[in-house]
Image (cartoon, rainbow, N blue to C red):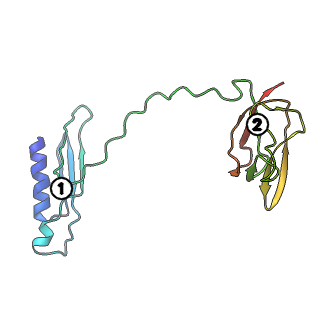
């Protein structure tokens, strides 16, 4: 079936008021669906345009199909999946240690709005130093470092929700 024949078939379905036309041959199958209402009569029923076109052909056979301007184009086929991009180096690969949230709550870098941050990038922390506060159910829980080292990165924005076991900081161990 040629491209022109398919376009003529689409136009025929649009004018005829038929809801669906399906043609199947040994090497392909084509289905054209229109939103036409079988209870509609008269000229209005003939003005509907087909909304779906489905063509199935053998893998080796390809035929580009141009849809009429009044008809939306079908969704493109999924593109082949490319090789995954190289993953950035993880904290474990770089020799960094994560300080993780021990609970669900809201992350704060300061003990109160008028105070300074507990730590900054480059700060040196020891085991037991407070690194942040997590508010959970109106209780402010001080989170202490379980590792000694230098803060390399702060992974969470101030006043952001955090999940259990979510990494908060990356620490270069001392």
Residue 139, quarter of the rendered image: bottom right
Q: Nearer the viewer, mark 2 or mark 1?
A: 2
Can the viewer see residue 1?
no
Q: With 145 as the anchor, is 90 left or right in this view?
A: left
Q: Decide: is 171 above or below 42.
A: above
Q: Secondary structure at mark 1?
A: loop
Residue placed furthest toward the front: 114
Q: Measuring from the top left, give residue 144's x and y in whole percent.
A: 86, 42
Q: Quadrant of residue 21?
A: bottom left
- Which numbered disc, 2 or 1, marks the residue that appears first in the sequence? 1
Q: Residue at x 60, y 28 (%)?
A: 88
Question: For mark 2, what is the residue?
Answer: 120
Query: Disc 1 designates what residue?
Result: 70
Residue 160 at x, y percent in the picture = 68, 51
Is 73 on the left-hand or right-hand side of 92? Answer: left
How far across and down, in percent of the image, does residue 26 sit? 18, 41
The residue nearer to you, when weighing 76 against 90, is 90
In the rendering, at what x and y percent does residue 104 appear?
74, 53
Foreground: 36 or 104? Answer: 104
The residue depicted at 79 percent of the width and 52 percent of the height is 114
Q: Are marks 2 and 1 in contact (CB under 8 Å)?
A: no
- Marks 2 and 1 sit apart, C-alpha to C-alpha, by 59 Å
């Amino acid at each position: 079936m040629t491209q022109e024949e398919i376009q003529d078939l689409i136009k025929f379905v649009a004018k005829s008021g038929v809801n669906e036309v399906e043609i199947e041959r040994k090497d392909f199958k084509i289905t054209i669906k229109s939103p036409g209402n079988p209870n509609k009569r008269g000229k209005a029923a003939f003005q509907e345009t087909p909304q779906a076109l489905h063509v199935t052909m053998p893998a080796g056979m390809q035929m580009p199909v141009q849809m009429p301007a009044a008809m939306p184009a079908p969704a493109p086929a999924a593109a082949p999946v490319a090789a995954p991009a190289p993953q950035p180096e993880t904290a474990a690969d770089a020799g960094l240690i994560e300080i993780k949230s021990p609970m669900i709550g809201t992350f704060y870098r300061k003990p109160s709005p008028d105070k300074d941050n507990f730590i900054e990038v480059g700060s040196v922390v020891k085991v037991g130093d407070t690194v942040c506060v997590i508010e959970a159910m109106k209780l402010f829980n001080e989170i202490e470092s379980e590792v000694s080292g230098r803060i390399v990165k702060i992974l969470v924005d101030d006043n952001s929700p955090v999940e259990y076991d979510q990494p908060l900081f990356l620490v270069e161990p001392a």
